[in-house]
Image (spheres, helix red, strand yellow):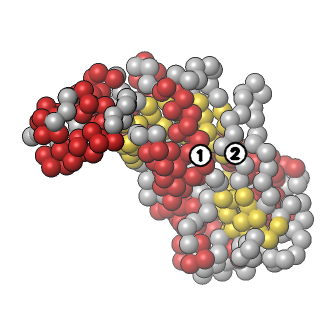
Amino acid sequence: MATIQDVARLAGVSTATVSRVISGRGYVSPASREQVLAAADALGYMPNGMARGLKTQRSGLIALLVPEIVNSFYTTISRGVEDVANVSGLHVILGNTDESVAKERAYVELMISTRVDGVIIAPAGRTATSLEPLLANSVPTVLVDRSVSGFPADVVRADSITGAQTLTRHLLALGHRRIALINGHRDTSVARDREAGFRTALAEAQVEIDERLISSGTWFIDDAEARTGAILDEDTPPTAILAANNFMAIGALRSLRERGRRIPQDVALACFDDIPDAAEVDPFLTALAQPAYTMGTLATRLLLERISGTFRDSPREIVLSSHLLIRRSCGAQLGESVVGLNVELGPDGDGRSPDRPAVLPAGKPAVLA
């Protein structure tokens, strides 16, 4: 295996010059740079990142831990993280926790042993227990999409309470009074927030809450399908369903089709998170589209500020607004006014609510994209 000395010898320069070219730091004449690069290419030289990390105390790696990598919402976040990281000369290690706190803890310990420069994570649990090693080892950490009480870290998330209110109010405005919520696990902050928003919207409309129509469980398709089926088989089934993410919307779709229920004629359906190529899904899903890519880019920027030490103050929280996309699955007649919502039509005939300012908790500064 070629060494830095071999490259210097072939290029006819000092090892210090080769080091400056490889690291991108310090001045090297264009001619010398070309000689070094040509020699490195000829010898197949690859810099030893581990050795360089021992000197700089940086690995050049950050970790992203998400609970459902097959969900397009998290793959979009991942793309945002990678785009910002790569521009900054960093590479991303991706881990899928499968909504498991135990698997999350194992990944956290692995990332610490790998000496990553920082971690971005969408937590799987309610408590900070699995994340505490990050704090104990002073690993810069940013939470994305979900928050955890008692863990002092920057957070980038969407406003799930307002989002659930928006979706519920929309279904109420269409005349529905028996609305089911197919929710995720209540150990996650987003599930608790979405249930809170759902309940608030029903209370505002003076609609009595039927606890049998509120179902919590895993965030996955099969479980959502089973839970939706149980609700549909009740003596007084719902006329509308709100799914807390796109996976559960697919589960609800399956359950409705198995029972021969038409969407939206028999049951209206709306969900959190748009599905890529939504026009391929019939009926087109009404969805609250969260800014997943922006979550990823902002989380990475906050992490880079922590890694570099340019920001050392108390944790920041960024709360982003979302867009309501009105499509066929809710039964709304596009082009007509919808009571109680400020909705405008998008270029493809989708209803799209205008942007709202970020929601900022008291005492927490905002960081704009």
Horizontal relation, residue 20 to residue 316: left or right: left
- Disc 2 from disc 1: Cα separation: 8 Å
Residue 114 sits in quarter = top left
Horizontal relation, residue 86 to residue 313: left or right: left
User: Which residue is nearer to you in this view: 61 or 46?
Assistant: 46
Q: Residue at x 84, y 49 (%)?
A: 203
Q: Residue at x 60, y 77 (%)?
A: 279
In terms of secondary structure, where does tag 1 sit?
Answer: helix
Mark 1 surroundings: few (<14), some (14-19) or many (≥20) residues within 10 A: many
Q: Residue 320, labelled with which disc?
A: 2
Tell me if label 2 and label 1 are in contact, CB under 8 Å.
yes
Q: Residue at x 23, y 43 (%)?
A: 35
Tell me which label, 2 or 1, sits earlier in the chain: 1
Name the kind of residue labelled 2 in the image. Leu
Q: Can you see residue 104?
A: no
Name the kind of residue labelled 1 in the image. Met
Q: Residue at x 63, y 53 (%)?
A: 291
Q: Residue 181 appears at what percent x and percent y? A: 67, 56
Q: Can you see residue 30?
A: yes
Residue at the far left: name it. 1
In terms of secondary structure, where does tag 2 sit?
Answer: strand
Task: Provide the residue designation for mark 1.
Answer: 295
